[in-house]
Amino acid sequence: MSIEPVWGAPIAWYLFLAGLGAGAYITSAFLRWRHPEAHGMRRAGHVIAPIVVAIGLVLLMVDAEAGLHNPLRFALLLSNFGSVMTWGVVFLSVFMAAALATAVLDFMKKKVPGWLEMAGAVVALCVAAYTGALLGVCNTYPLWNNALLPVLFTVSALSAGAASVLLVAVVRHADEFNKAGVLKKFHFCLPIVEMLLVASLCFITAFDSTAGFESVTSLVAGEWAAWFWLGLVFVGLILPTALETWLLFFTSKEFEESRKAHWISFASDAGVLVGGFMLRYLVVMAAVPLTFVM
């Protein structure tokens, strides 16, 4: 007997948007520490965070297959603190409160307290990790029930969040973008780490069980191979890494600060966002369950 997956594309969008929002908030906190003069970029992260997470939560609650359209089931989630999903609700609730408070203070042109931004960043990190741990609840799916998945989704969330803030900066805050060298170099490292984690996840899962091997085969050489190699690996990981390597290490400072270079960075960051979604979509859709013989 095989167990059919209960999650589909809406859940992939939810996982992506929750991670993106968490990563954007963490990016703003990082900017406060390393680039305190980048007020516009920080504000962008503060605005992106609650909006995209709210959209993701709406997708989660209206997805009939997830079952959370049932108010009774949603209420029960708040009473079972042994459940990963319950902790997810707690993390998301606290994060949304912190993110909304931060955004309101920003719009009122009032200083965001350091303790609020730090607390929000810590909870945001929990949200990013939770998006990976949530899938592990279904322990009959080797691709999901893997200790590396929360780590991978956290790194991807940080990368997508930074990419979203940098995208806005290219369009609206070019001067701040030019001065955010530490953030750009930190962001450059994340897709490289992500590539290593994706390879490790596939390797470990393939040798875990027959279902794990079938999941990985479906990704790299089967039904989902084109999306995996083109959408995730090339567009989402290799292309951004190649473009940023060239811009950061093989071009002059003058060219790096030109509008042409800015739009190349824009394309790179857009690729990171495409890869962030494709990662979650493929992990959700390609998972093959264990088969039990009765």
Image (cartoon, helix red, strand yellow):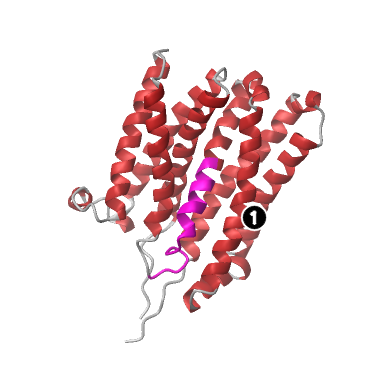
Tell me the residue at 29%/48% (across/down): 87
How far across and how far down the image is residue 99, in percent? Answer: 38, 30
Q: Decide whether residue 88 is among the magenta residues.
A: no
Quarter of the image with the N terminus is bottom left
So how many labels did they put on this image? Answer: 1
**Figure check: 167 above or below 131:** above
Q: Decide whether residue 157 is among the magenta residues.
A: yes
Circle 1 packing at 10 Å, graded few (<14), some (14-19), many (20+), is many
Region of the chain picked out in magenta, as a range: 140-158
Q: Is residue 166 visible?
A: yes
Tell me the residue at 46%/32% (across/down): 25
Q: Which residue appears farthest toward the top when viewing the image?
A: 109
**Figure check: 226 above or below 150:** below
Tell me the residue at 62%/56% (across/down): 196
Q: Is residue 236 visible?
A: no
Quarter of the image with the C terminus is bottom left
4, 39: nearer the viewer: 39
Which amino acid does the dot numbered 1 rest on? Answer: Val
Tell me the residue at 58%/62% (across/down): 200
* Corner quadrant of residue 182: top right
How far across and how far down the image is residue 15, in percent? Answer: 43, 49
Q: Secondary structure at mark 1?
A: helix
**Figure check: 287 above or below 97:** below
How far across and how far down the image is residue 248, in percent? Answer: 74, 35
* Corner quadrant of residue 185: top right
Write down the residue under mark 1. 233
Q: Which residue appears farthest toward the bottom when viewing the image?
A: 294
How far across and how far down the image is residue 231, in percent? Answer: 62, 53
24, 3: nearer the viewer: 24
